[in-house]
Amino acid sequence: MQLTRPELLDAYRRMRMIRAFELKLAELVTAGKMGGFMHLYAGEEAVAVGVCRHLADTDFVASTHRGHGHCIAKGVDVAGMMAELFGRATGCNKGKGGSMHIADVDKGMLGANGIVGAGIPLATGAALSAKLRRTGGVAVAFFGDGASNQGAFHESLNMAANWKLPAVYVVENNGWGEFTPTDFVIPVKDIAVRASSYAMASAIADGMDFFDVSEKAAEAIGRARAGEGPTLLECKTYRFMGHFVGDPLKYRTKEEAERWMQQRDPLDGFEARVTEAGLVASADLRAIDRAVEEEIAAAVEAAEAAPLPDPSEVTTDVYVGGAA
Amino acid sequence: MQLTRPELLDAYRRMRMIRAFELKLAELVTAGKMGGFMHLYAGEEAVAVGVCRHLADTDFVASTHRGHGHCIAKGVDVAGMMAELFGRATGCNKGKGGSMHIADVDKGMLGANGIVGAGIPLATGAALSAKLRRTGGVAVAFFGDGASNQGAFHESLNMAANWKLPAVYVVENNGWGEFTPTDFVIPVKDIAVRASSYAMASAIADGMDFFDVSEKAAEAIGRARAGEGPTLLECKTYRFMGHFVGDPLKYRTKEEAERWMQQRDPLDGFEARVTEAGLVASADLRAIDRAVEEEIAAAVEAAEAAPLPDPSEVTTDVYVGGAA
Amino acid sequence: MTQQRKLGFGQAVNEALRIAMETDPDVILLGEDVAGGGTREGEDVDEMGGVLGTTVGLVKAFPDRVLDTPISEMGLIGTAVGAAATGLRPVAELMFIDFLGTCLDPLLNQAAKLRYMFGGKARVPLTVRTVTGAGMQAAAQHSQSLYWMTAGIPGLKTVVPATPHDAKGLLLAAIRDDDPVIFCEPKSLLFAPGEVPEGDYEVPIGKARLVREGSDVSLIGMGATVRMCEGAADQLAKEGVSAEVLDLRSLAPLDEEAILATLEKTGSVVVVDEATPRCGIASDVAALCVDRGFDFLNTPVRRVTAPHAPVPFSKVLEDAYMPSAAKIVAAVRDLRT
Amino acid sequence: MTQQRKLGFGQAVNEALRIAMETDPDVILLGEDVAGGGTREGEDVDEMGGVLGTTVGLVKAFPDRVLDTPISEMGLIGTAVGAAATGLRPVAELMFIDFLGTCLDPLLNQAAKLRYMFGGKARVPLTVRTVTGAGMQAAAQHSQSLYWMTAGIPGLKTVVPATPHDAKGLLLAAIRDDDPVIFCEPKSLLFAPGEVPEGDYEVPIGKARLVREGSDVSLIGMGATVRMCEGAADQLAKEGVSAEVLDLRSLAPLDEEAILATLEKTGSVVVVDEATPRCGIASDVAALCVDRGFDFLNTPVRRVTAPHAPVPFSKVLEDAYMPSAAKIVAAVRDLRT
Ligand SMILES: Cc1ncc(C[n+]2csc(CCOP(=O)(O)OP(=O)(O)O)c2C)c(N)n1
Ligand SMILES: Cc1ncc(C[n+]2csc(CCOP(=O)(O)OP(=O)(O)O)c2C)c(N)n1
Ligand SMILES: [Mg+2]
Ligand SMILES: [Mg+2]
């Protein structure tokens, strides 16, 4: 599957945007300019971008507590996201959701989710909608290795396999669930093997390799669109930063983290691959880096200048009918 | 594994007791002498008895809505059970539980359960107790094919495998969950394959063959006692009667049921095997049949004569401390 | 009013489902045995249409829109929420409300909150049908009236009809409501017949029903306890006490104006609920009376509910457990002495 | 009283856990990251002791009795129930009470009911520690005060301490109680220091605490709202209004006598709860006042609670959402005009 130059530049731009966005948030939260529980996606960019590049706005994704990357990959407006995280009225959720609930249904983004595993049935429902309403759409659930131990995972995959739903279950296996190593709580090496409980197709991708993720996601999404049923796609990846901003990281070794960051950074890998193949020049990528930095700086500036929600908003949007 | 003659007679007596008990209940409920939701175990006797013969009172079993067979196999007093189902003060649960909650913790019987799948974590907890308190005991969870689609199944088996708990998970695959055929809701042929999601040992037994169940249960329980971890044991069986007493059975064919009852009745199979092998004479079994009938008749008589609970009992036993 | 046909509560629900499916192609049913299995090719078998037969016949009428699910409440309710947020209008069946413990999260943290968390950018037109209440010796895990748990969750609506007429009209309103609604079917009413109009009509969510007028005391019930209140009112009438009976119908939102109106009229309220006493609808009604209705109160507000205990199996205990006309009459007598 | 050392609420909880484990070998801890992972052989790493550090150090002291579980609330709480029914005395951590939706059944239908369903032949000495409440911009799914859901379930007990002193004493009482107890740790109090006696002591479950005496109005709070009530009382004192403050501490069982005693004394009650308004503790207190306390009532009973809405993220909205001393003062002023 050969990507065109514009496709390559777009993929890089999204991955860089995620990385830069997350680094900026770490800075802002640490500086006390932003509040809430914040889980950053740095290191896992290739997964979100490698999968979402095959999706349209009419396809749905359900995300996790670590959802910024999925939003950006799915095309949610970065300025709206930044404003949301600043709790502004101009935020994509009007300041009511914050990091753990950041969403944009119009973009097919069904929201970050504060409940580990809860996005899996939501995506399953979106796939059921697509199938029964014949929209031709697919639904993707992103979730972590830890979430694969939730009952919602088991129940949803069984239903989806049974009904041959147009769904893809992307497990982001980053080796950790909060502070607990994955192998402390999961007795199998590959979460992908769990597909066999449902006679479901499965695949394992190198989550640090954009091209590998993209290729395997293309196959899975293709199967889903063709009505051939769901796939469990395991992406082996790594979280570069703490579980949340402020995590002292005392539970894992510096060496482990540095090994991944130095040798397996998805952005470095992408750059090496495309420049060595002569598809894109490093200069083009640097230009994107600068553009991304500017876009984020502008987003921060706009967000800080934006109005806070009116206190009366506290009881709106509870019901469609109106206030509670 | 050769059984002694007393062991064989005891196994037959328990299986016959279950069968006769259930037939009597069907009669009593149909005659309006007994109330409540009643799920009968007839046809599946070899599973409960084949497993529980390897257990002591200090081992625990957690059961299902279809729990009478597990109680009898685990040694719960039949007269106490009958009184319970009549809602009498002399019942093994003082008339407060009924069929769906019939229990006797002193016998290691943690109760029938009205919540499909809920017994699985309870047994897992009993296994954790046995391990941490070094009692040398094991815990067995009985549950149906339908229950294997519950999140509690997935979460519990993963934890048990992870901690190498002394547990055995016995799935009674009777081909139906209420009125829905198992293959409508489970895309794999053998539920036993689900053990592979947890790197757990598994086995499949012919649930209509007492000897096959007993042998495979012995291995699994042996592994558990030896500290080698849990097993998922699938027993292929069939429910001879309706899902509940009063079930019109319009959703399955007479032929299907008759095939099982005529060709695979676990009591007939047991009798053929032991008589042909010359281990027991049919006359011995007929004597047991009569003794069982008498015991049940006496249990019914005693229960009907027993006092009803005092209305004040409605608020006792809510807290150990006493009334609510 | 012209002589109308009588239907059982369950039949009224079935009719509402059929009308909703006929009038909106996005309405689907899913749940355990709602089709009712047994539909293998070439086999001479018939479907059950739910464990209580409420959905019988619908799978034949709408073969692709009535889905039997595995026994996976978290999965089926969560799937229904996701489907509702993406274009369908699902009616999910939770066989008994006692099973809420296996699927609370998709209701508590997803269905109820998506719209708010997303700043108004989502709607979840989900209906969950479920069976509530005691009276059939179904014991502790199949007899609860847990609607207080859903009524207390902002973002959900909860209704419990007391008659086949309201069952049909409230269910049609619930399915067409753009917010998630928990629709409760009291076990003890399921086969009780009542007059049900033909055709398509809705009973508005959030409006109580004045069952009978009275001037001395207000008996406020819901679902299965409305009949008990009427029975008590009959008895009290014999004793010269004029009781007004109000059927809440909607537990969330609560019809506060109707409650305050009857309190103002009689000055005395007895709330009757099959549920357990703590954190329930009865407490909310009493709290409303002593807040906004304080000036109207001539007597204490009494709550006739189940005791703070699980539901027992034995018939004698279950009878002692449940509210009854006699217990309501006793409460009223006590208020008046 | 001699000058005592001050500990944070979380430290007081940690100390209670250590004492409970030292005094009873059957006490174990299990939950997500309660050990805190990172204890691989030969690696120079340290454990976290829970997402908020509350259980830090305990795995080192009791290596086999502090168990990290998978992210499987249904499995871990259900396992804890089974363990409690078979000889252990587990303290399970539900990281945030918002996650109740993933593990309600083992509490609602198992822990709470086993003893009753079995005719008194079981005991479930389980403690579930969980974090409640808003105030940290943790948004809709990490800020709820769902203790009303557990308080309403017969067979469970629910407590919510307001001080480090009570946190330690109530947790020791909860662990040693033979019934299942839900122990709530209000987020906004976790790091607030307070005096905590050394050694082993218990605070009885079911007894409210009279925080300050007053004669004009009773402010009844729990957990995080007790401080707000005290702040309001200070302000009211300046206005010449003498407010009594009662800390419920135990939500189930409720200390009805203490509530009625303060009502009898002041004739006027304001109940303050962080939770949403429907089917909550505030309604139960108001309902008690208008039932058994009717003759003492000189004013309406006001409830100062969160609105009927999810918890918003933005600080300005979260502030508007939560009860406060100012809102309590306003409610009292309104009662007195
Ligand atoms: C139901 C539930 N349980 C626990 C938590 C607390 N929690 C938040 S993130 C997390 C770890 C998730 O691990 P994983 O699924 O591997 O995702 P990752 O953080 O590694 O991306 C936990 C335990 C939660 N939010 N929801
Ligand atoms: C959580 C829950 N969901 C649904 C039910 C209703 N129900 C009772 S038995 C049953 C079928 C169970 O099937 P299976 O596990 O195969 O056991 P079997 O009845 O075949 O022995 C169902 C759906 C229940 N009791 N609990
Ligand atoms: Mg992870
Ligand atoms: Mg079955």
Image (cartoon, coloured by chain):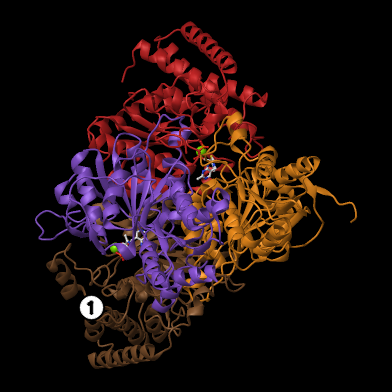
Chain colours: A brown, B red, C orange, D purple
Task: Please provide percent x and percent y for residue D225.
Answer: 39, 63
Residue type of the residue flagged with mark 1? Gly
Q: Which residue is mark 1?
A: A269
Front in this rendered view, residue B203 or D129: D129
Front in this rendered view, residue A170 or D174: D174
Q: Is residue C329 left or right of residue B10?
A: right
| Snapshot quadrant of residue B251 | top right
Category of crowding for the residue at label 1, using alpha-carbon neighbours closer than 10 angstroms: few (below 14), some (14–19), many (at least 20): some
| Snapshot quadrant of residue A46 | bottom left
- Report in which chain the residue with disc 1 lies: A
Q: Is residue A20 above or below residue C210?
A: below
Task: Please provide percent x and percent y for residue C231.
Answer: 75, 42
Task: Please provide percent x and percent y for residue A83.
Answer: 39, 84
Residue D101 in view here: yes
Image quarter in which the C terminus of chain D is found:
bottom right
Q: Is residue D29 left or right of residue D38?
A: right
Q: Is residue B70 above or below residue C59?
A: above
Ligand 1 within 8 Å, label 1 CB? no
Residue at 41% over, 12% down: B9
| Snapshot quadrant of residue A5 | bottom left
Q: Is residue B268 above or below residue D285?
A: above
Number of residue marks: 1
Residue C92 in view here: no
Q: Secondary structure at mark 1?
A: helix
Task: Please provide percent x and percent y for residue D336.
Answer: 53, 69
Extreme-right residue of the structure: C2
Front in this rendered view, residue C161 or B160: C161
